[in-house]
């Protein structure tokens, strides 16, 4: 047990402490104090912690798990152990970011809202004299999807109410300070458009009733809203009112005492850390030691297996002779996703209007003359999970196809299938925002399938990958039936890729296949 503590548990504790202290400080100084980059809260409070703990688990803690004998006849438990330690690091770090946002916020006391522009900007405000204008409001509706397979359809109604010094000021044409309110409801994304419209109308009526009966003038203090989808929605509501004034300040009413702003976040940081580490320690007690790996670590010998895994990974993502286009396509897709994140559009998911602005495929616009959207949408993704899954699929199939096709044929097949998949999408759907490389990638899988069925690859290779490829295709098409996934693009890409594969089959050099296909 002493070796488990020294090699695994203590580094886990130190990693948790280091991440919590260092990143929470950087979060405060860079994103709260200096307000650099203008990133949304979901990026600073969730996305970055998720990435940091993932990298820590992958490169620092996971290699140490080899001293545990977790191999069974059915496989290894190392991935499960890695997941548990990742969660144990992630949960406290995310809660810590929520805590630092509220704990570091200062409360500024104002006699009237007119003083707000004269005071140094803070997060929280109390106002003695004010009037909430409930008649001259701005309203904006927004919709987005969520869930691993976009199975949820989210409806939002944002309401912006002018905050005046007195009721006599309500006739003034402009206002710079607003009270923001949000109503939201989630329904299934598998519903047809007519049913969604019906549900939205019901939601709008209920929201109207709630708004009419709400006493918006009662609150304890006001919270200046941070960069988020909610802020963007409320900003649009201000624009809809046509009474906005330059730099509009949007505030959210808080009804609890200021002293209670942190809730029990600090206790949750400590509690989740203690629970996570306790569970982790108990899990370390279960398996026996792998003496060979333990001796290797004690003797300071390098991990040959890890070095080989890293070498294989680098080879998979490094452009080189005979394997150039696939990694470049992956880098291009990831670069565009990162640009969208840095631009403040989100992290987990992006809104439909932002995707349209960046070049999403949308029937009315594409058919109206924006034919370039047939291509640009194949380099856009709806969010983090979407781009991650697609790039994994691209790397896998590209590894096998590019060495035998060559960079020109692979790139041509990729782009052609992507465009044909986009055509299938606007042919099948009248007005659906469609993005993603999955149409092009399905095209490559269709091409891959054509090669295996026509015995381009060796029999042993086809036997090993044909079933898994069919399962992959069937699973993704089945998930498309849940709703929120452009199955038309998937099918269009798959069929076009299969046809392209049949056309290219006679041009394949059998000698190249034997030299590049793994046994």
Image (cartoon, rainbow, N blue to C red):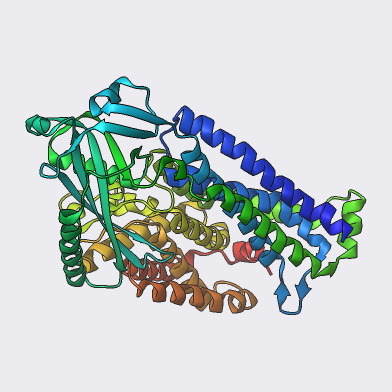
Q: Is residue 54 visible?
A: no
Q: Residue, x 51% and y 31% (percent of image)?
A: 30
Q: Position of residue 238 (x, y in %)?
A: 19, 39
As rendered, which of 287 and 454 lies closer to the eye? 287
Relative placement, left or right, of 462 versus 230 is: right
Q: Residue, x 56% and y 45% (percent of image)?
A: 96
Relative placement, left or right, of 187 versus 299 is: left
Q: Position of residue 10 (x, y in %)?
A: 78, 50
Classify 462 as above or below 316.
below
As rendered, which of 39 and 490 lies closer to the eye? 39
Relative placement, left or right, of 413 versus 82 is: left
Viewport quadrant of the N terminus: bottom right
Q: Quadrant of residue 510?
A: bottom right
Relative placement, left or right, of 51 versus 145 is: right
Classify 310 as above or below 427.
above
Q: Residue, x 19% and y 42% (percent of image)?
A: 161
Q: Position of residue 117 (x, y in %)?
A: 28, 23
As rendered, which of 324 and 242 lies closer to the eye? 242
Classify 62 as above or below 228.
below
Q: Position of residue 517 (x, y in %)?
A: 63, 65
Viewport quadrant of the C terminus: bottom right
Q: How many marks?
A: 0
Furthest-left residue in view? 171
Q: Quadrant of residue 490?
A: bottom left
Classify 343 as above or below 384.
above
Q: Residue, x 49% and y 56% (percent of image)?
A: 388
Q: Is residue 149 visible?
A: yes
């Amino acid at each position: 047990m002493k070796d488990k503590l020294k090699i695994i548990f203590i580094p886990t504790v130190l990693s948790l402490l280091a991440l919590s202290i260092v990143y929470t400080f950087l979060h405060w100084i860079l994103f709260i104090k200096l307000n650099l980059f203008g990133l949304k809260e979901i990026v600073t409070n969730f996305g970055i912690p998720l990435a940091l703990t993932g990298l820590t688990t992958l490169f620092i803690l996971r290699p140490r798990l080899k001293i545990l004998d977790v191999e069974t006849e059915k496989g290894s438990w190392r991935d499960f152990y890695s997941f548990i330690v990742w969660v144990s690091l992630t949960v406290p770090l995310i809660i810590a970011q929520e805590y630092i946002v509220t704990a570091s916020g200062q409360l500024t006391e104002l006699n009237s809202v007119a003083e707000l522009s004269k005071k140094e900007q803070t997060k929280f405000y109390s106002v003695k004299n004010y009037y909430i204008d409930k008649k001259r409001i701005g309203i904006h509706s927004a919709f987005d999807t969520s869930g691993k397979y976009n199975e949820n359809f989210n409806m939002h109604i944002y309401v912006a109410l002018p905050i005046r010094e007195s009721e006599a000021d309500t006739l003034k044409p402009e206002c710079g300070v607003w009270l923001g309110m949000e109503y939201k409801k989630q329904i299934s994304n598998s519903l047809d458009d007519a049913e969604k419209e019906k549900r939205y109308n019901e939601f709008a009526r209920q929201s109207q009733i709630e708004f009419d009966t709400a006493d918006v003038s009662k609150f304890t203090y006001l919270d200046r809203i941070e960069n988020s989808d909610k802020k963007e929605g409320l900003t649009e509501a201000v624009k809809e009112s046509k009474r906005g004034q330059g730099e509009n300040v949007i505030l959210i009413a808080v009804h609890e005492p200021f002293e209670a702003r942190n809730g029990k976040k600090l206790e949750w940081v400590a509690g989740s850390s203690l629970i996570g580490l306790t569970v982790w320690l108990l899990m370390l007690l279960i398996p026996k030691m792998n003496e060979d790996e333990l001796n290797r670590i004690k003797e300071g010998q390098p991990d040959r297996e890890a070095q080989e895994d890293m070498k294989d990974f680098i080879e998979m993502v490094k452009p080189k002779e005979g394997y150039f286009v696939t990694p470049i396509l992956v880098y291009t897709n990831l670069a565009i996703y990162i640009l969208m994140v840095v631009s403040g559009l989100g992290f987990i998911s992006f809104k439909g209007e932002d995707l349209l602005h960046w070049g999403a495929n949308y029937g009315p616009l594409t058919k109206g003359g924006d034919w370039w959207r047939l291509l640009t949408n194949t380099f856009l993704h709806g969010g983090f999970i979407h781009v991650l899954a697609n790039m994994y699929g691209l790397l896998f199939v590209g590894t096998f196809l590019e060495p035998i096709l060559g960079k020109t044929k692979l790139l041509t097949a990729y782009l052609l299938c992507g465009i044909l998949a986009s055509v299938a999408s606007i042919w099948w759907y009248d007005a659906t925002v469609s993005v993603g490389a999955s149409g092009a990638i399905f095209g490559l899988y269709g091409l891959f399938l054509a090669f295996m069925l026509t015995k381009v690859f060796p029999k042993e290779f086809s036997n090993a990958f044909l079933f898994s490829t069919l399962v992959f295709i069937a699973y993704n098409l089945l998930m498309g039936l849940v709703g929120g996934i452009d199955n038309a693009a998937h099918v269009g890409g798959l069929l076009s890729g299969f046809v392209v594969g049949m056309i290219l089959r006679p041009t394949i050099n059998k000698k190249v296949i034997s030299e590049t296909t793994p046994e």
